[in-house]
Image (cartoon, rainbow, N blue to C red):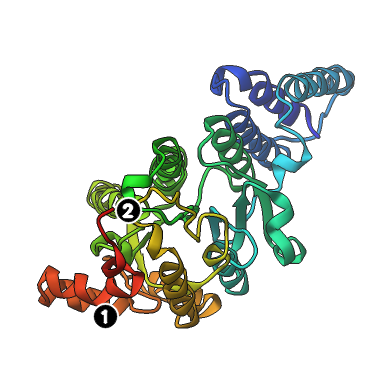
Amino acid sequence: MSECALVRCRHVHSTFNSVCPSSSSIAHGTCFVRHSRQCDKIAQSAECQKPTSPSQTATQPALATATNASIDSIHSTHPASSSTTMSIIHKKTVLITGCSAGGIGHAVAKNFQQRGYHVFATLRDLSKAADLADLENVDIIELDVTKPDSITRCKERVAHVTGGTLDILFNNAGVEFIKPLLDQDLTEARELFDVNVWGLLAVTQAFAPLVIESRGIIINQSSIDAVINPVFAGIFSASKAAVTRLSEVLRCELEPLGVRVVTVMSGSADTPMFTKPGSQMHLPETSYYYNTQAQSYKERMDFQSKAWKVDVLAESIVKSVLAGVRYPIWPGSFGFLVRILTWIAPISLVDGLINPERGINMVKRL
């Protein structure tokens, strides 16, 4: 490298800290990549000629030593500026929450991967990633949407390898349980809202700058339960009603920033949620709804048998989003039916169609 190149390179690196004062290791890493590229251009510049005199030649070792010291100082001060920092992903990127095996997030992650995206598949328990861990261009990341530190670590990791952008964020993580509202433990109810509602908003707030930078897409997983009155699913349906309203307001608020927000009013899909703890009621004998438990569970199992295969649901969601849809979509079993009924039918008719099979007519005063 010529003297001119060395001097300019040293200047670029020695001013690194003043140019990038952020305390974020990700910001430092991104800036270091940019400065390194400047050095490469300087080193190749035709205006910097080889030394033509002995005095110039003698100057080179000292300049090289100073330059290397400056670069070494940056690496030691900012660990994020390692060789991995230089490896920026150039594919379209998508981050999906709630990617446990068998679920919607898992199927959506595989669908995007097959379409050539680099996928960040997140979940609380990494052991449940299953075959996602074997796929190319899929990063498995631990993420608990209820914990700010976990969200921050995940965001920094993604920003680190994308250069501070994210093309698609899919808020899919969610939990469900079945219980009459009069028997509902409020601590348990708050925990569900922490995941389904506040977790979704916290992740969106954290990753929004990355999505805005790429003028990307945010997908929020809601449910047809948000617009009907399913007995014994009051807490879950209330959380999805909140998600729907948050998502639609986000659609309006983020549109001026170039971000498209899509709400998924998902119908039924055959996922492990049907058989997880909480999917069957266990009520005390003193409950007004004690006699409905067997019928409620039977209806739930019948409902599962009519549900869409999760891969089919994932394909429908991804295809619609990539086609440019800008308003809520209604994939899944009964999705289209619920959309039409809630538009044209009286509430009493909709209630009468969905609730008797759940055992509500078996309720008796004690």
- Kindly identify the amino acid type of the residue bearing the numbered disc 2: Tyr
What residue do we see at 25% from left, 54% from top?
248
Q: Which mark is residue 261?
A: none
Could you say where residue 341 lies in the image, as x and y percent from the top left?
Answer: 18, 77
| Depth check, front residue: 208 or 110 | 110
| Depth check, front residue: 273 or 251 | 273
> Does residue 150 appear left or right of residue 4 in this picture?
left
Q: How far separated are the C-alphas under marks 1 and 2?
A: 31 Å
Q: Which residue is identified by label 1?
A: 337
Q: Nearer the viewer, mark 1 or mark 2?
A: 2
Could you say where residue 267 lies in the image, as x and y percent from the top left?
Answer: 38, 72
Could you say where residue 117 lies in the image, as x and y percent from the top left?
Answer: 58, 65
- Kindly identify the amino acid type of the residue bearing the numbered disc 1: Leu
Please tell me how crowded label 1 is: few (under 14), some (14-19), or many (20+) other residues with Cα within 10 Å. few
Q: Which quarter of the figure is the N terminus placed in?
A: top right
Instruction: State which tag comes first along the sequence, 1 or 2.
Output: 2
Whether residue 138 is visible here, answered yes or no, is yes
Element type at marker 1? helix
Q: How many marks?
A: 2
Element type at marker 2? loop
Q: Which mark is residue 288?
A: 2
Label pair 1/2, CB-CB below 8 angstroms: no
Could you say where residue 333 lies in the image, as x and y percent from the top left?
Answer: 39, 79
Residue extending furthest toward the front: 366
